[in-house]
Image (cartoon, rainbow, N blue to C red):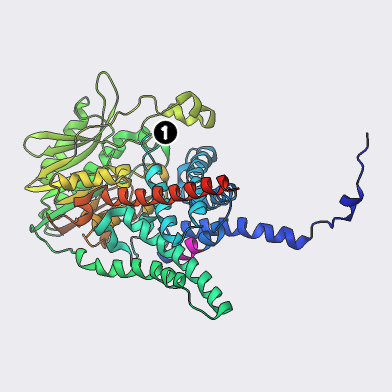
Amino acid sequence: MSATITPVEAAQPAPSPVSWKRRLVRPAAAVIAGALLYLSFPPRPLWWVVLPGFALLGWVLHRQRLRAGFGLGLLAGLGFMLPLLHWTGEEVGPVPWLALAAAEAVFIAVGCLGIAAVSRLACWPVWAAAVWTLDEAVRARVPFGGFPWGKIAFGQADSVFLPLAAVGGTPLLSFAVVLCGFGLCEAVRQFRAHRRTGTLPRAAVAAAATVLVPVAGAFAALPLVDDSAEDGTATVAAIQGNVPRLGLDFNSQRRAVLDNHVRRTEQLAREVKEGKVPQPDFVLWPENSSDLDPYRNPDARIVIDDAVKAIGVPTVIGAVIEPDTGKLRNTLIQWDPKKGPVDTYDKRHIQPFGEYMPMRSVARVFSSDVDRVRRDFGPGRKVGVFDLAGTEVGLVTCYEAAFDDAVRDTVMHGGQMIAVPSNNATFGRSEMTYQQLAMSRVRAVEHSRSVVVPVTSGVSAVIRPDGTIVQKTKLFTPDALVDEVPLRSSLTPATRMGTLPEGVLVLVAVAGLGLVTVRSVRGRRGR
């Protein structure tokens, strides 16, 4: 049966090429907006491009239908997360990387749906920035304990907005940056309307405020950024022993990794005796610096003990502990030169699909590398603070630096400085190590603490409480950093308030979404 064309259909003009081009403008702008968010993250010093990124995203989403908001948000999320998380496929191939980036992009798409909804309200940049903060809060908690990577605050280590981290933590810092970006969008929109009408509406003043208030707030918070030594100083050494080769197989030479850190510690001891570097008060080794359990392997225990005795000060050892039953533990061991191991901290936020394998049978469909994780790690329960030669050192192991509570807990339990022992060897020379280092810089300002980051393969660093890096290593180079760091005990407003600023912003977002819902229901009833 052949199709027939009615006279009405025949009379309708064919879609012009121009109309199709116009339809592609917003999708293309959404991808560009996401790419700008990515470009604002390290190792690029382009923190400021996040502002035009959110301004463009605001234009893309403004007054769009919910379905369009979701679709455009998905494109922006992919433009952001695909390049940002490229390092996750460094050694396991593209499928896990694409799956994770797509999942994170879906979270962003849901958030953008909410932003499109509240963009019809007065002062919409405030509501929209709060919705973005709500979206980040959810991403940081679910599923599998959350994945905070890509939180806007973590791209702002060099930003003028950074002091706000000391006021309300990473949620307030993210909110302020997003608000300023959306405010720029609304300010441009109001300026264009002013040129057409010749009048300056109140909305234009409100739009200007959404840009100026976050900037003014950041400058007002500058006195909270202080690197003075309230409790004196401590001389800290961070050991980077390096790994025998890159990639997932570096742990197959576990003894070589341990020997590298022993060798570099003993070299440091000789340099101290020769007067080339000052005697450290304590030494920090990275996460996984001994993947041989020193409690079960006498040879590992002997070489560690010899290295610690050589340097003669308490040393923190990153080890994999293998109990007879139950799960493995990613442990930091406080090793005394006279007493041996005296205290431990077990990593609390362990990495899904890295340190343990949820839904193993499903994950195997995406990558056979899941079977490399033969025995899952289990999370610790105790907050990690070691007394190292009289200095209270808060312990945050690698991946934990992305979680607000893991860092804050150590300071609330008396940490005068923070150590972030890490192992990034699996991710090669990718941007991952620089993204993670930026987190530690933000944490330094958030809690007004020195942060020392010893990494197996780099980049290791010493960070002042004002977020500045005073020493750092090169990638895949054996090295030792020795520096006198200021110790502090005062608490920033962010540390004192904890999740309160985030909770308030979440309530603002929920109120905005609720207001939109009520208006929509009333509108339908009035028809």
Tell me where residue 355 appears, x and y as whole percent: 36, 33
| Residue type indicated by callout 1 | Phe
| Residue 325 to residue 105: above or below | above
Q: Which residue is mark 1?
A: 353
Q: Residue at x 51, y 79 (%)?
A: 199
Q: Is residue 428 magenta?
A: no
Q: Which residues are magenta?
A: 50-55
* Main secondary structure along the magenta-highlighted residues: helix
In the picture provided, is 142 more to the left or to the right than 400? right
Tell me where residue 28 appears, x and y as whole percent: 61, 58
In the picture provided, is 216 more to the left or to the right than 51? left
| Residue 407 to residue 335: above or below | below
| Residue 378 to residue 95: above or below | above
Which residue ends up furthest to the bottom in the rendered image? 198
Number of marks in picture: 1
> Where's the N terminus, which quadrant?
top right
Tell me where residue 300 appears, x and y as whole percent: 22, 31
Which residue ends up furthest to the front in the rendered image? 526
Which residue ends up furthest to the top in the rendered image? 325
Q: Is residue 16 visible?
A: yes
Name which quarter of the figure residue 23 lies in: bottom right
Circle 1 SS class: loop
Q: Is residue 476 visible?
A: no
Q: Is residue 51 magenta?
A: yes
Q: Residue at x 90, y 52 (%)?
A: 10
Give the crowd class for mark 1: few <14, some 14-19, many >=20 residues within 10 Å.
some
* Front position in the image: 310 or 349: 349
In the picture provided, is 393 more to the left or to the right than 88? left
Tell me where residue 131 appears, x and y as whole percent: 42, 51
* Front position in the image: 19 or 263: 19
